[in-house]
Image (spheres, rainbow, N blue to C red):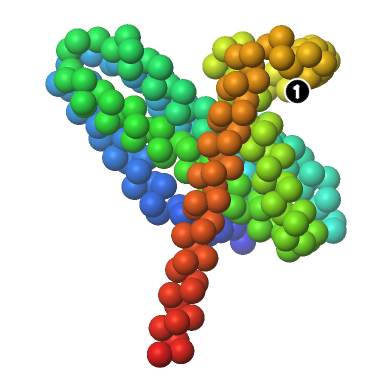
Amino acid sequence: MSKTRMFTRALLAEPCFVPLSLCTALGFSFLLARCYISGGAGYVFLIKNLFLAWIPYGLSVATTMTPRPTGRRAVAALWLAWLAMFPNAPYIFTDLVHWRWRPSTMPWWYDLGTLLTFALAGWFCGIASLRIMHEQVRRALGGTSGWLFVVIVSALTGVGIYLGRFERWNSWDVLTRPKFIASQLLGGLANPLAHGRTLGVTIMFGAMVLVTYTMFVSMGKQTNIQHRTSNVE
């Protein structure tokens, strides 16, 4: 079986794939209707940003199908790529800033609904991918290490969202300009109180990722409890 076919099967087997696809399709239908009604191509940047949000989800699925221990280098590369691309998923929520300068060709509620649909699809692509990675860490290192991993990723994501929205950095800058990025980050860490917006954005969005992920996981636990209860009855 080819790797492409194996990846496709693994992707389709993920329980979140269909709901995420439906949310994505809904966002595209809103955007297409908007283009047709308004006669323009506004908000097309949402397509690129949502595509970037799907990448960490695909990478997380790929990490589950790489053979070990012979594929250690491939696994490490996939994990690093996932970590670099992960902030793109929750980052799409910051696209709501464009609603302030929306054109007047469409009702405000339609543009808000379109932006929110894309934002939710992107955000939960990230949350679902984090769940896949968290489960792998938990199985390998234990529950405490698994949640420590989630907390660290959430904090780094807050930094990534700030760098993307305000500094206009891209995920690939980690590979193309690692020294420059490291110097900028170390400068901010040396005196965080002098960078109030950086600290505020990092804490706020990092906390949002952590809390929404906790909510996502707790719903899965509730489903398992209900399933066990029904079996007992």
Q: Amino acid at mark 1?
A: Leu
- In this image, 190 relative to 46: left or right? right
**Where residue 73 appears, x then y in whole percent?**
83, 45
Residue 75 to residue 135: above or below: above
Q: How many marks?
A: 1
The answer to whether residue 111 of the structure is visible from this angle is: yes
**Residue in the image at 40% along x and 17% along y:** 97
**Residue in the image at 59% along x and 52% along y:** 131
Q: Quadrant of residue 132?
A: bottom right
**Where residue 86 appears, x then y in whole percent?**
61, 35
Seen from the viewer's position, the closer of residues 20 and 152 is 152
**Residue in the image at 54% along x and 44% along y:** 211
- In this image, 114 relative to 56: left or right? left
- In this image, 203 relative to 173: left or right? left
Per the image, label 1 sits on a secondary structure element best described as helix
The answer to whether residue 127 of the structure is visible from this angle is: no
Which image quarter holds the C terminus? Answer: bottom left
Residue position for label 1: 175
Residue 17 to residue 24: above or below: below
**Residue in the image at 52% along x and 65% along y:** 221
**Where residue 93 appears, x then y in whole percent?**
45, 28
Dot 1 surroundings within 10 Å: few (below 14), some, or many (20 or more)? few
